[in-house]
Image (cartoon, rainbow, N blue to C red):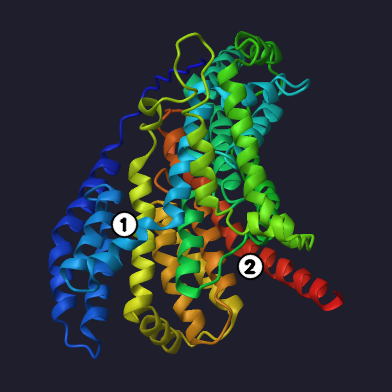
Amino acid sequence: MSTVTTVTEQPPKLAGEERFDYIRGRFGLIAALPLLIGILVLPIDMPNPQQAMLAVLTVVVLLWITEPVPIPVTALIGIALLVVLGVGTPQEVYGSFGSATVFLVIGAFILARAMTVHGLDRRFALKVLSFPGIGNSTYRTAAAFGVVACILSMFVSSSATAAMLLPIGIGVVKTIGDLIQEQNPGIKTNRTKFSCLLMLSIAYGASIGSVLTPITGIANVIGRGTIERMTGYKVELFDWISMSAPYLLVMGAVMWVALILVNRPEVKHIRGGQDYFRAHYADLGPMNRGERNVLVIFLVTVVLWVLPSLVTTFGITSPIVTAFTDHLNEGSVVVLTAGLLFFLPRGNGSGESTLTWTEAAKIDWGTVLLVGAGLTIGTMMNATGLAETLGTTIARATGVQSSWVLALIAIVMGLVISETTSNTASVGIVVPIIIPIALAIGVDPIIPAMAGVFGANAGAMLPVSTPPNAIVYGSGYVPMIKMISTGIFIDIICIICIPLIFGAVVGIGSLIALHA
């Protein structure tokens, strides 16, 4: 079994950062209860369940932004308040935790955990970085880390991808840092432009790649689940990819240009870089049985995930095939396939299965709770009628009538909120607000809602914006000013590019449908 131990020195926060975080947290803690009571007793023309739902939603958003307690804890407190304040019965409120989306997250996390336990993700990363011509150039090395992060995060979580690539990146930064310091004695090894370029390539690559499918990024899962619960429409895998693939390509290019402009490396050539990657890949040895088991299970899972879409796309009408694929729910598929890992032998003579429960139990259960709570909030907003009330009110106040103007608003909201809290919380806040506005003005809510999801995922300016940002910032190799200066450029371009991407995709789809 391949294991990776990462010991990174956490940079101390600046006094200003510590003070800001303290004030932010104290404000949320002090303001939460008065805000809750104030909204509950406010004399507004709204049914009691709606008013209570509004009070809980407002307090949850406040606590998500100020973070006096962890975000999953806030989510649990919020849904408990929904029951206590009579917004819904326990069965109605907690029923969302039985959603297939929650089980999809659990199964996917277990599968990703197996990849990490057996080092399959590390093997893939080092293999790509060992390709000829990559390791001897600072530009190509940083670009390769970004591409690897992007590809890995399509299959495992963006945070797991960044955490796995971080120790490899630190090794490269230290090796190349010595060379840079030889040529530039006044530069600190952990403050080179190359270190920023490589670390931010990991963070941004992981964030971009996680958008490709609706099941790899937790923000995507919450956004898709909220859309389905509030509109009754499920965004199919191929439909999602038709929108996310152009986004990935365009934003990948934009982020790379921004990274190069702000963090141009001090040197272009790396002496011995190729040998460094090849030596570490050779140290892994041949693929063991545990890795092969995980790889096979992963491939089977992907095939079963895409099979229903393929059947629909190619118009297969065989009763046997359609009867089978009709029951291939994504959550059920991954729970079953991940469960097989506990039956298959590890093959190292220990008698253990490929994955033990002790190893599997280390998945991020806080995120699982957050997904369930996010779906609950969207469901109860719809059930109480608050979603429709908010949508109508906001639509009248803003005068927005166009789907594209609403999409632009969703992108800006998603970006701004994700820069002050996580992208996951941002989606949980934006999508339930955007959908009822779209319905109130009589436009298709899918495009504005998806724009909000993509906008929330594009936050790049601060460590808190996305988990990969926080992970690479914690390495100590990325000064805050560099992350902010790079992120501002990316945020501005996102606001311009995402509506254009969506417009192009919808336009092409309409032409295809017209000539079909």
User: What type is the residue that disc 1 sits on?
Assistant: Ile
For the point 72% across and 19% down, which residue is it? 136
Closer to us: 140 or 186? 140
User: What type is the residue that disc 2 sits on?
Assistant: Pro
Residue 42 vs residue 399: left or right? left
Q: Secondary structure at mark 1?
A: helix
Find the residue positioned furthest to the right.
515
Q: Do we see residue 420 in this rendering?
A: no
Q: Which of disc 1 and disc 2 is earlier in sequence?
A: 1
Q: Is residue 55 above or below residue 168?
A: below
Relative image position of residue 423 (x, y in whole percent): 44, 53
Q: Is residue 277 above or below residue 160?
A: above
User: Would you identify the image quadrant in which residue 352 lies?
Assistant: top left
For the point 66% across and 66% down, which residue is it? 502
Count residues near mark 1 (Cα–Cα under 10 Å), then give few for <14, some for 14-19, many for 20+.
many
Relative image position of residue 267 (x, y in whole percent): 67, 23
Count residues near mark 2 (Cα–Cα under 10 Å), then give few for <14, some for 14-19, many for 20+.
many
Q: Kindly identify which residue carries mark 1.
A: 65
Closer to us: 289 or 19? 289
Relative image position of residue 139 (x, y in whole percent): 69, 30
Closer to us: 127 or 19? 127
For the point 65% across and 59% down, which residue is it? 323
- Numbered circles on residues, count: 2
For the point 31% across and 79% down, which residue is it? 384
Residue 71 vs residue 274: left or right? left
User: Would you identify the image quadrant in which residue 476 lies?
Assistant: top left
Q: Kindly identify which residue carries mark 2.
A: 499
Query: Could you give the CA–CA distance between mark 2 and mark 1, rounded to whole angstroms?
Result: 26 Å
Q: Is residue 466 above or below residue 229?
A: above
Relative image position of residue 68 (x, y in whole percent): 22, 50
Q: Secondary structure at mark 2?
A: helix
